[in-house]
């Protein structure tokens, strides 16, 4: 048995992950570690045997953990990592701060980070996946991030280090982001609040926000976020090519592509991770047969399937 370091934070062996993901699926992680602070995290990673994998996990809003679970230490930050501080146009946010909270606090201070308001999840995932909507991306407002390396060193990451692309970055394996600094344009607080209310209303009218989903299932083939503009072309939106392949509402087991928005996969009826992943692969197959377009997963899938 691997000898594990003794941190100040909470280390739980064989911890089920299904209750920590929005889709409510997934088997156990070998360990779940909830550090108290950055020094606790750094010491733990430094002393952790090299052959133990590390998987940083946020609020699980964009994640399928497979039914066999994860052979890794899942690092999940909570209190102590969710602070939000504002200095002029710069917003410093802990990795566990929710995107929506960052947008709201920034708006009160007259800083425009409104695009974050409707993005499910927390700051760590927003940076890691270059989250965006309405034509704005995390990369557009990113100044720097602080991370702890797999060797336990605390480092500062620039945009160049992360190499932001559509829905991805080059964060090295096992590194854990602990906070990020954003810089947004100035705005009028009341106008920013009104814009966010409008965005929320649009989202709730077009997306299954009351269902158990993980946000967009596939990246848009066009390679950019919806801009929200009237002239935005729909031909290369994931929902459109899924519709064209006749897969709106399609089901596998308890998993379903939403009738309301066909690029949202929902856990409609006690789905397993395998149901969700198999449905996604069936959608990819049908779309490719229909249009020659190969959809790329936007939801991260990790872990191992259940052994047959």
Image (tube, grey):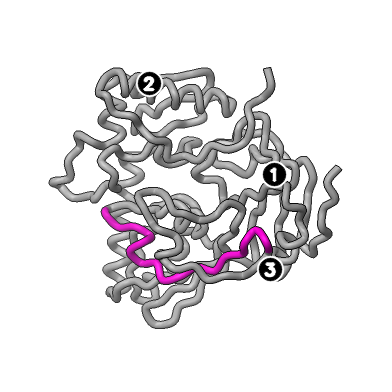
* N-terminal-most mark, 2 or 1: 1
Magenta segment: 135-151
Q: Position of residue 215 (x, y in %)?
A: 43, 41
Q: Is residue 126 above or below residue 235?
A: below
Question: What separation in Å lies between label 1 and label 3 (alpha carbons)?
Answer: 20 Å
Q: x, y (%) of residue 233? A: 17, 40
> Which residue is found at the position 52% from the left and 71% from the top?
156
User: Counting other residues with Cα less than 10 Å from the Cα at mark 1, is it few (<14), some (14-19), or many (20 or more)?
Assistant: some
Counting residues from the N terminus, which is met first, the one under dot 2 or under dot 3?
3
Give the SS element for disc 3. loop
Q: Are marks 2 and 3 in contact (CB under 8 Å)?
A: no
Residue drawn at the location 45% of the way across and 50% of the way down: 120
Q: SS of the residue at dot 1? A: strand
Q: Is residue 256 above or below residue 238?
A: above
**Circle nearer the N terminus (1, 3):** 3
The residue that appears at 49% across and 43% down in the rendered structure is: 62
**How many other residues sit within 10 Å of disc 3, few (<14), some (14-19) or many (≥20)?**
some
User: Label 1, on which residue?
Assistant: 72
Residue bearing mark 2:
285
Q: Is residue 209 visible?
A: no
Neighbor class of circle 2 (other Cα within 10 Å; few <14, some 14-19, many 20+) is some
- Looking at the image, can residue 177 be seen? yes
Quadrant of the image occupied by residue 130: bottom left
Q: CA distance from mark 2 to mark 3?
A: 44 Å
User: Could you say where residue 230 lies in the image, as x and y percent from the top left?
Assistant: 15, 47
- In the drawing, what numbered circle is on residue 37? 3
Residue furthest out toward the left? 231
């Amino acid at each position: 048995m691997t000898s594990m370091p003794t941190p100040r934070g909470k280390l739980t062996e064989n911890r089920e992950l299904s209750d920590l993901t929005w889709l409510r699926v997934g088997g156990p992680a070998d360990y779940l570690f909830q550090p108290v602070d950055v020094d606790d995290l750094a010491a733990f990673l430094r002393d952790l045997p090299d052959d133990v994998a590390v998987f940083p996990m946020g609020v699980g809003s964009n994640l399928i953990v497979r039914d066999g679970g994860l052979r890794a230490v899942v690092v999940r930050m909570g209190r102590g990592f969710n602070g939000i501080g504002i200095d002029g146009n710069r917003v410093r946010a802990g990795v566990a701060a929710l995107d929506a909270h960052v947008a709201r606090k920034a708006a009160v201070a007259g800083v425009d980070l409104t695009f974050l308001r409707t993005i499910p999840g927390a700051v760590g995932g927003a940076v890691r996946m270059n989250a965006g909507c309405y034509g704005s991306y995390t990369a557009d407002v990113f100044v720097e991030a602080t991370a702890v390396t797999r060797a336990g060193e605390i480092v500062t990451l620039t945009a160049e280090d992360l190499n932001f692309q559509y829905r991805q970055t080059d964060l090295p394996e096992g590194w854990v982001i602990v906070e990020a600094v954003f810089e947004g344009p100035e705005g009028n607080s009341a106008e920013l609040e009104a814009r966010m209310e409008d965005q929320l209303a649009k989202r709730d009218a077009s997306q299954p926000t009351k269902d158990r989903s993980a946000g967009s299932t596939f990246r848009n083939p066009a390679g950019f976020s919806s801009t929200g503009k009237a002239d935005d072309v729909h031909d290369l939106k994931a929902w459109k090519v899924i519709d064209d392949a006749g897969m709106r509402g399609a089901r596998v087991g308890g998993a379903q592509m939403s009738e309301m928005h066909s690029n949202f996969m929902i856990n409609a009826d006690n789905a397993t991770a395998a149901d969700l992943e198999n449905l996604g692969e069936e959608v990819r197959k049908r779309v490719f047969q229909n249009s020659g377009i190969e959809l790329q997963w936007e939801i991260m899938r990790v872990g191992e399937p259940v052994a047959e």
